Amino acid sequence: MKIANITLRAQSLNKSFGAKPVLTDIDLQLNAGEWLGILGESGSGKSTLLRILGRFQDADNGKIHFKKQELKPVSGQLIPGHESIKLIHQEFELFPNQTVEENIAYSLRFYEAAYRKEKVAELLSVTGLDYVRNQKAKLLSGGEKQRTAIAKALAEQPAVLLLDEPFAHLDNHNRRVLGNAIETMRQQQEMSCLFVTHEAADALAWSDRIAVLREGKIIQIGTPQEVYNHPVNSYVAELTGDINWLSDASNTKQFYIRPEKIKPTRNPKKSKWKGSVEAIRFHGNHWEIRCTNARNEKLSFYRNRMDLEVGQDVHLTYALKDLKSI
């Protein structure tokens, strides 16, 4: 990868609060036009990393480059932040008594009226906010506030957009609406985006690459498919989705397999695991079947139709390549 394609780069970042390390040896790069998801549990250092990258807080040591320029310490800036890097907090920072349209237009206040009107209309369309353009910000739902904050940031045409838990506290409807807006932005806006989340489904759905952050350290970086299908350890495997743990016959080695890789079979000769149905859970677009066997092993698999019942014996099969050890 050529250095010219890198928009934002962090090298050897460390940050502690008192004696507690929060970030340790962070090396990260955000490429031009890329959406990079930082996946980690609460307390893993995600928000601190965002504030450092957004130039609102200094690391204890390390370097940050925007394109080819090394950025100066925040402590030496008159105004925190960076004109080409926009950080959207969970608090959104909107003007509560101004309308959606007025909030977006404020970011364009130094432009001519005709351009301002055209750009506001474009951003309202991109973020799906036309229907609340005249609504005051304090009356918006959480999802509408999130999209207004994004539109306001996009008005300033940032090279890098930083999002702090963009899907947090949203109901399913608003998650879908925001997801549609993000998909439109990805197609129409020329920018790079780094977002942090504790939800694996969001990171897998919207990232070109995922960096898994644990206790302030990046433990794996890769495409969503690489991280999901080839996790570096059991922590990443369990963080990114449901897994089953199985032991070999001697009980000395453990393997894991994803539930979607397991299928029931009516042919006992093809069976690799036999047990009985312990519980059935409906998840809307599929059923989760939980089973147990004579060795007290627990195993779950998914089914898109319901033709099993609790207490029923089942034979299960899977491809050996899907049974993995870590």
Image (cartoon, rainbow, N blue to C red):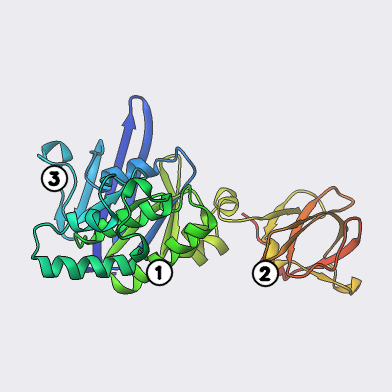
- Structural crowding at the residue carrying mark 3, measured as other residues with C-alpha within 10 Å and reported as few (<14), some (14–19) or many (≥20): few
- Work out whether residue 80 can be spotted: yes
Q: Closer to the observer: label 3 or label 2?
A: 3
Q: Are marks 1 and 3 in contact (CB under 8 Å)?
A: no
Q: Which residue is mark 3?
A: 72
> What SS does tag 2 mark?
helix
Q: Amino acid at mark 1?
A: Glu
Please report the residue visible at 32 percent of the width from the left and 51 percent of the height from the top: 27
Check the picture and name the quadrant holding the N terminus.
Answer: bottom left
Q: Position of residue 64 (x, y in %)?
A: 22, 50
Q: Which residue is mark 1?
A: 183
> What SS does tag 3 mark?
loop
- Work out whether residue 32 can be spotted: no
Q: Position of residue 209 (x, y in %)?
A: 41, 63
Q: Position of residue 195 (x, y in %)?
A: 37, 54
Q: Amino acid at mark 2?
A: Lys
Please report the residue visible at 73 percent of the width from the left and 70 percent of the height from the top: 304
Check the picture and name the quadrant holding the C terminus.
Answer: bottom right
- Structural crowding at the residue carrying mark 1, measured as other residues with C-alpha within 10 Å and reported as few (<14), some (14–19) or many (≥20): some
Q: Position of residue 189 (x, y in %)?
A: 28, 70
What is the number of the mark on residue 321? 2
Q: Closer to the observer: label 1 or label 3?
A: 1
Question: Rounded to the nearest whole Å, what is the CA distance between mark 3 and mark 2?
Answer: 49 Å
Lower position in the chain sequence, tag 3 or tag 2: 3
Question: Rounded to the nearest whole Å, what is the CA distance between mark 2 and mark 1?
Answer: 33 Å
Lower position in the chain sequence, tag 2 or tag 1: 1
